[in-house]
Amino acid sequence: MIDRREFLGTTVALASGAASAASCRPETPRPVPPTPAEQPVTDFELDEVTVRELQAGMEEGRYTALRLAELYLERIVAIDEDGAGRPGLHSIIEVNPEALDIADALDRERKENGPRGPLHGIPVLLKDNIGTSDRMTTTAGSLALEGSIPEKDSFVAERLRAAGAVLLAKTNLSEWANFRSTHSSSGWSARGGQCGNPYVLDRNPCGSSSGSGAATSANLGAVSIGTETDGSIVCPSNANGLVGLKPTVGLVSRAGVIPVAHSQDTAGPMTRTVEDAAILLTALTGADPRDPATAASEERRESDYTRFLDPKGLEGKRVGVARHLFGFHPGVDRLMEDAIAEIGRLGAEIVDRVKLPEGEEMGEAELEVLLYEFRADLNLYLAELGEKARVKTLADIIAFNEANREREMPYFEQELFVRAEAKGPLTEKAYRDALFKNHRLSREEGIDRALREHRLSAILAPTGGPAWTTDLINGDHFSGGSSTIAAVAGYPNITVPAGDVQGLPVGISFFAGAWSEPTLIAIAYAFEQATKHRRKPSFLASL
């Protein structure tokens, strides 16, 4: 093991973690596909290790928080960076130069006072739109926010620190959470380049929480946090073989998170197991005066979501099948039929052909809402950054991108930015009508009605298809998915690995009404424990 201070200096240089903001960021955009590994990726002693197992290792003296941080940072260098024999995954945008000191202090605290809880000393990865007031920057992958450090932690970062977690690194993402262009490539940002998929490197990790998905799947951290507006947690979890939990909007505070749209935005866990997702969700929740939406959660949130981890959690449940969301890929359909049969064997009653409004019915209204809210919410976020921000408004960012076109827009444009900038205030009738339509279709005439009429515990659908080949010229080409209705409603959605199609992972989603996380966790855990479909990635160059 190299000297700790020498190692800290190495990782700081590699990730440029202070305000200089990431020497791992290229001067010109990174190529696609990522450089394939010239040699097989070797096994890692922390491969697939859970939070509970890491805690046991620290309690037994086999590990310390410092050693865990060192091991994961070494793995980031070996897997994520370009170089001979390395996959060049590009899932990490910068590491925390204080991570080893934080871990060391938590080790001393454990010796003196015992652990704070299950996340004490656990290395956690954060998407680079989640604010941290430390030596890491928060940029949404954009050069326009290069060097930006908020004056205060986001509530998410604050809660994780209070739980004793080590904030190890920031993850790459689809720039501006994939709300800049109509034909962007998920996982590309001007700061981080193109993130790859650890199963097959020339395949896309989906987004916008691309780096959180790819890095966690590749075992570059114990667990991670992503954010979602529509699909940005569940889609990369699907593509990277993870459990992804998008909570009810208002269960986790958005304060300090670079926004897309307040009616749909939320942060949430991205993990390799349902248990780890439940542990992480427990730490993240709580009322926050900086986010009024969390006031409703005060009486609805649970003090410990791990108590719903029941291997018999499907017994007696009525699970609806949203079959109209099938049919976009025959391999996915076969996996879903196998999953439905297994869910029935585990004691659930299957209610087939539960009809929900089609995503297309909400599509135009959803985009209208997002355009209005993006302009309003982003301008507010930038105003709160104060004088440190080089850009003060969305209009400034549009101008910055044009002035820095070679680095910011080498592959795709900023059509959504331009359309959002043309919108007026949130008092306009067009916005209010679109938001009303969204909620009517997704809630009253959608999930709420289906749950009530069929007496359902939850509804299932395929999360998405197998990962597509990354294409920076033409952009993403999704085959299908089911995220929209729960996203527009602001209701929870959990995805769990359901198998693979030609080596590419595919997930199954369970969603229900507001504050139904306990039920969804029980269902997902029972399915996961019975099927064990998660497998670690193989880092193939191509199929």
Image (tube, helix red, strand yellow):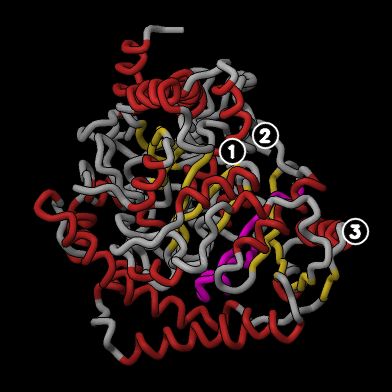
> Residue 57, relative to residue 207: is it above or below?
above
Q: Nearer the viewer, mark 3 or mark 1?
A: 3
Q: Are marks 2 and 1 in contact (CB under 8 Å)?
A: yes
Residue 542, image x, y percentages: 64, 36
Residue on which disc 3 sits: 345
Q: Secondary structure at mark 2?
A: loop
Q: Which mark is residue 217?
A: 1
Q: CA distance from mark 3 to mark 2?
A: 26 Å
Q: Amino acid at mark 2?
A: Lys
Q: The C terminus is located in which quarter? A: top right
Res 501 seen here: no
Q: CA distance from mark 3 to mark 1?
A: 29 Å
Residue at x 19%, y 47% (from the top left corner): 151
In the displayed structure, does residue 508 sit left or right of residue 56?
right
What residue span does the magenta drawing correspond to? 479-499
Res 44 seen here: yes
Residue 457 in which image quadrant: bottom right
Most foreground residue, 343 or 89:
343
